[in-house]
Amino acid sequence: MGNSLKETFEGKIDFVGQKTVDDISRIALIVITVVSFIVGFALQSLSVTFAIFGGSSLVLILLLLPPWPMFNQHPVKWLPVIETKKGQ
């Protein structure tokens, strides 16, 4: 159990997973900004604007920051190391 827990939190994310996280965060932050501005403008409250933006950003961080296994579905296959002798 300890080994699988270590592998979960080790932080392996492939390049496709990084692109997915980047796309989700970019779109979500734009939507969060627009929604919080509109709601804050409608209610004439700057504190509501910041509360919506901060809370939504916190939820987004909790969803995207950990290295979830769904972001490592296409791991990179590295080539084997080729050893060479020095002096040649």
Image (cartoon, helix red, strand yellow):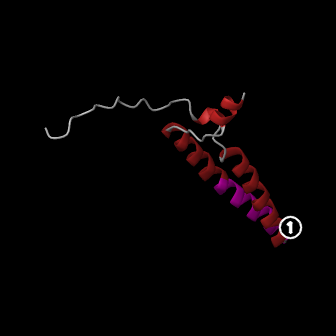
Apparent side of residue 12 relative to residue 78 in the rendered image (left or right): right
Q: Residue at x 71, y 50 (%)?
A: 60
Q: In the image, is residue 36 part of the stretch drawn in magenta? A: yes
Of the pair 42 and 6, the residue shown nearer to us: 6
For this rendering, which residue is in front, 38 or 6?
6
Part of the protein shown in magenta: 29-44
User: Does residue 9 belong to the magenta stretch?
Assistant: no
Residue 75 at what x, y percent from top left? 49, 31
For image coordinates 79% across by 66% down, the residue present is 49
Which quadrant of the figure has residue 35?
bottom right
Q: Amino acid at mark 1?
A: Leu
Q: How many marks?
A: 1
Splitting the image into 4 quarters, where does residue 78 fall?
Answer: top left
The residue that label 1 is drawn on is 43
The quadrant where residue 11 appears: top right
Q: Quadrant of the N terminus?
A: top right
Q: What type of secondary structure mainly makes up the magenta span?
A: helix
Q: Position of residue 17 (x, y in %)?
A: 55, 38
